[in-house]
C-alpha cells in the first residue's frame, strides 16, 4: 500500500457508531425503531418495558412474524432489510422501516439481546450483540414473535450518554413516540411499563377508543370526525372542537400512510381551517391520517423519517384545510356563544366573543352543558306563556355585550327568572323524581334543578378556594395510593398548588405514584382514585402552560363533574341546607354554564296553563 494514500474504509463498528448518531439520538429513538419493526412484523400485541427512562433498559416484545436464525443474525448488519428488494420498491414503501439501519445502529451503541421465532419454527434464536460484535447465537425455546432488549444505551459512547437529559425528560420523549405509534395502530394492543409501573395499557380497538384510552375519557365529547376522499389522497381522523383547544402544543398528530409526520405547513392548513374560532394562542387537538400513493411523496429526506415532501403540496394543503373545515363546521356548534362571560362575578378580563344568534347553534351549545334537558322539557310546559320578568338590579349594570349573550340564550333561559330569588321563610319542600326540588311559598312555587344547584354551589366554593389558595380538606381514614401515568405525574407536579388549594392533600412516593391523604370536603362519596383521575382529566383539558392562568374553566368543569348526580334522595334538612347555600351564591338562578337552576311558577302562570288546556279541549 502506498503510504501516501491516506483514505481508508472505516471499520464497520465505527461506521455503525457514526450512523447510530443519526438514528439513535436518545432512548426514545430506540423505542420508536423497535416499535416500528414490531408493527412491520404484523404484531397484534406489543409490550414495551422501560427501566430508568430507557437509560439502563428498553425492551420491546411482539407477537409478530419473527425471524429465521439467519435473518436474526443478518438484521444487525447495516443496510440489512427485508423490506426493499430493488430501487422501484423505494417508491412504494408501505412499511415503517426500509433503510435497514436501525438495528445495526442500536447494536453499535448498546448491549442487545434478541429472542425470536417464526410460527413454523420448532426452536427460536437467541442473539447477543455488544458494540456491533456478535457475542452469542444459540437456539432457545421461544414462542412466535420477537423480543429485543437494549441495555445500557451509549455505554461505549460516554459523550452521548452524558448528553442524555433527566429521566423525566427522556421518559417524556419515550411516551411521545409510544403514543404516536399507538395512535397510528389502534388495532394493535400495547402496554408500556416504566420501572415496573404500568403507564399505558391499550387494548386493541377503534381509533376513538385509542384516543380516549391515551388522553382520557373526557376527549370523547370534543372529537369531530373528519373524512374526505379525493383522487389525490384520502384523509380521515378526528379534530378537537375549537373550544377544547389548549394553550400548550403536543396533541397534534399527523400521519401520512400511517407514519407520524412533522409538518408545519400542514399544521398551518389545519389551524387555518379553524378560521378564527380558536381562542388566541391555543392549539386544537387533532389525529389525522392521510393515505396517499407513495409515488407522490418523498419520505427519504430525513434520517428519522419524520419529515415529508409532497410533489403537489398546494393541493394537499387545500384538501386538508377543506376537510377539517367541513369536520368542525358540522360540530362547531355555538362555540361563538360565550358562556365564559358569566355576568355576575367575572372580572372584565376578556372581551366576549361574537355572539351568534343562530338558534341552531344555541340549542347545540346547551347540549354541551348537558344536564339541562329535563329542565327544558319542563320549560316546554310553559311555552306560550307570556312571561314578563324584571331584570335583576345588577343586570342593567353589566356590559352590553354580555347582556346580549343572555338574549340569545335558549328559550329556557329566557323563561327562567333573571331575578335573584330569596327563599321564602315559611317554605315547604319536596323532592320530585329525586331530581327536582319543589319549594312552595304562599306566592309562588319554585322548581329547582338539584344538580344544577349543586353545580353553582360547588363552582363558587372552588372559586373561593382557588383565590384564597386554601382548600377545605377532609382527611382520609385510609390514605390511598394512586399510580399515575408519566404524563399525569408531570401534570401533578406542574399544578400542585392548585390541586392543593382545591382540597386534595397529596404526597409523592416515587415511581409515578402519589398518596392521597385528603380530599375536598363536600365531595360526593366516591372512589378517591377515580375522582383524582377525573380532576387530572379536567386539569389536562383546562391546562394552560405551567400554571392555571384561567382557572375558571377548570373549576367550572369540576363543579359540573362533582355536583351530585340526579337521583339522589335528599332529606328535607339537606334540601334546606342546599337551598341556603344556593341563595348565598352570586347567581342562584343559573349555573356557571348558563343553564337555569330555578323556574318560578306563580299562581297566574299556573292558571294560565290550565286555561290554555281548557281552550284546547
Ligand atoms: P428496517 O426496519 O429499515 O428494515 P431494521 O434495522 O429496523 O431495518 O430491521 C432490519 C430487519 O430486521 C427488518 O427488515 C426485518 O426483516 C427484521 N426485523 C427487525 N425487527 C423485527 C421484528 N420485531 N420482527 C421481525 N423481524 C424484524
Ligand atoms: Mg426498522
Image: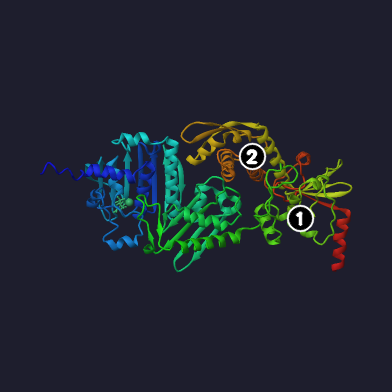
Question: In this orientation, does residue 107 appear?
Answer: no
For label 2, the residue is: 525
Q: Mark 1 packing: few (<14 Cα in 10 Å), some, or many (20+)?
A: few
The percent coordinates of residue 278 (x first, y second) are: 59, 52
Relative image position of residue 429 (x, y in whole percent): 81, 45
Q: Which of the two residues, 607 or 39, is positioned nearer the viewer here? A: 39
Query: Of 498 and 511, which appears nearest the observer?
Result: 498
Here the colouring is rainbow
Q: What secondary structure is found at the residue carrying circle 1?
A: helix
Task: Identify the residue at horizontal 69%, vertical 41% (top origin).
Answer: 459
Q: Quadrant of residue 531?
A: top right
Residue drawn at x 78%, y 55% is 414
Residue 442 x %, y % = 89, 47
On the question of residue 154 being in view, the answer is yes
**Side of 90 where 217 appears, left or right:** right
Q: Quadrant of the N terminus?
A: top left
Tell me the element at label 2: loop
Is 553 positioned to the left or the right of 442 in the image?
A: left
How packed mark 2 is, by other alpha carbons closer than 10 Å (few <14, some 14-19, many 20 or more), is few
Residue at x-position 66% and y-position 46%: 560
Label 2 vs label 1, nearer the camera? 1
Checking the image for residue 407, the label placed there is: 1
Amino acid at each position: 500500500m502506498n503510504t501516501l494514500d491516506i483514505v481508508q474504509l472505516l471499520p464497520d463498528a465505527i461506521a455503525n457508531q457514526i450512523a447510530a448518531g443519526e438514528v439513535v439520538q436518545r432512548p426514545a429513538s430506540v423505542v420508536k425503531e423497535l416499535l416500528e419493526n414490531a408493527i412491520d412484523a404484523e404484531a397484534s400485541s406489543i409490550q414495551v418495558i422501560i427501566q430508568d427512562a430507557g437509560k439502563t433498559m428498553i425492551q420491546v416484545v411482539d407477537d409478530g412474524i419473527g425471524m429465521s436464525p439467519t435473518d436474526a443474525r443478518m438484521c444487525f448488519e447495516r443496510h440489512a432489510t427485508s423490506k426493499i428488494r430493488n430501487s422501484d420498491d423505494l417508491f412504494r414503501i408501505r412499511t415503517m422501516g426500509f433503510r435497514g439501519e436501525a438495528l445495526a445502529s442500536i447494536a453499535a451503541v448498546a448491549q442487545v439481546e434478541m429472542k425470536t421465532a417464526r410460527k413454523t419454527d420448532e426452536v427460536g434464536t437467541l442473539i447477543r450483540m455488544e458494540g456491533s460484535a456478535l457475542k452469542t447465537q444459540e437456539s432457545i425455546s421461544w414462542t412466535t414473535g420477537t423480543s429485543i432488549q437494549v441495555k445500557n444505551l451509549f455505554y461505549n459512547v460516554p459523550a452521548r450518554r452524558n448528553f442524555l437529559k433527566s429521566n423525566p425528560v427522556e421518559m417524556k420523549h419515550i411516551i411521545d413516540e409510544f403514543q404516536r405509534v399507538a395512535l397510528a395502530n389502534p388495532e394493535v394492543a400495547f402496554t408500556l411499563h416504566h420501572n415496573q409501573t404500568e403507564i399505558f395499557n391499550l387494548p386493541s380497538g377503534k381509533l376513538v377508543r385509542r384516543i380516549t384510552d391515551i388522553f382520557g375519557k373526557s376527549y370523547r365529547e370534543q372529537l369531530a370526525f373528519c373524512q374526505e376522499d379525493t383522487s389525490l389522497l384520502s384523509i380521515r381522523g378526528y379534530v378537537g372542537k375549537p373550544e377544547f383547544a389548549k394553550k400548550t402544543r403536543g396533541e397534534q398528530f399527523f400521519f401520512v400512510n400511517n407514519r407520524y409526520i412533522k409538518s408545519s405547513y400542514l399544521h398551518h392548513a389545519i389551524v387555518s381551517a379553524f378560521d378564527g374560532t380558536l381562542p388566541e394562542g391555543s392549539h386544537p387537538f387533532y389525529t389525522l391520517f392521510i393515505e396517499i400513493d407513495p409515488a407522490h411523496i418523498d419520505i427519504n429526506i430525513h434520517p428519522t423519517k419524520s419529515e415529508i415532501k409532497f410533489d403537489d403540496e398546494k393541493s394537499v394543503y387545500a384538501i386538508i384545510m377543506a376537510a377539517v373545515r367541513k369536520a368542525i363546521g358540522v360540530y362547531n356548534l355555538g362555540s361563538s356563544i360565550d358562556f365564559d362571560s358569566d355576568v355576575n362575578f367575572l372580572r372584565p378580563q376578556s372581551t366576549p366573543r361574537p355572539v351568534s344568534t343562530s338558534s341552531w347553534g344555541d340549542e347545540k351549545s346547551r347540549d354541551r352543558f348537558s344536564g339541562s334537558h329535563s329542565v327544558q322539557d319542563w320549560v316546554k310546559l310553559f311555552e306560550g306563556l307570556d312571561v314578563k320578568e324584571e331584570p335583576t338590579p345588577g343586570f342593567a349594570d353589566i356590559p352590553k355585550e354580555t347582556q346580549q349573550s343572555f338574549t340569545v340564550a335558549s328559550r329556557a333561559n329566557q323563561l327562567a327568572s333573571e331575578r335573584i330569588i330569596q327563599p321564602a321563610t315559611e317554605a315547604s319542600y319536596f323532592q320530585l323524581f329525586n331530581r327536582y326540588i319543589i319549594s312552595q311559598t304562599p306566592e309562588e312555587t319554585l322548581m329547582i334543578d338539584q344538580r344544577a344547584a349543586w353545580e353553582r354551589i360547588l363552582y363558587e366554593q372552588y372559586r373561593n378556594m382557588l383565590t384564597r389558595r386554601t382548600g377545605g380538606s377532609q382527611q382520609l381514614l385510609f390514605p390511598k395510593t394512586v399510580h399515575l401515568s408519566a404524563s399525569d405525574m408531570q401534570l401533578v407536579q406542574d399544578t400542585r398548588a392548585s390541586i392543593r388549594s382545591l382540597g386534595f392533600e397529596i404526597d409523592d412516593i416515587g415511581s409515578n405514584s402519589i398518596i392521597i391523604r385528603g380530599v375536598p370536603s363536600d365531595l360526593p362519596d366516591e372512589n378517591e382514585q377515580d375522582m383524582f383521575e377525573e380532576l387530572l382529566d379536567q386539569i389536562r383539558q383546562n391546562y394552560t402552560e405551567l400554571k392555571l392562568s384561567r382557572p375558571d374553566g377548570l373549576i367550572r368543569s369540576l363543579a359540573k363533574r362533582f355536583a351530585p348526580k340526579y337521583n339522589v334522595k335528599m332529606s328535607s334538612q339537606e334540601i334546606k341546607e342546599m337551598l341556603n347555600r344556593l341563595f348565598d351564591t352570586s347567581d342562584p338562578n343559573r349555573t356557571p354554564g348558563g343553564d337555569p337552576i330555578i323556574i318560578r311558577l306563580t299562581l297566574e302562570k299556573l292558571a294560565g296553563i290550565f286555561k290554555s288546556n281548557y281552550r284546547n279541549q
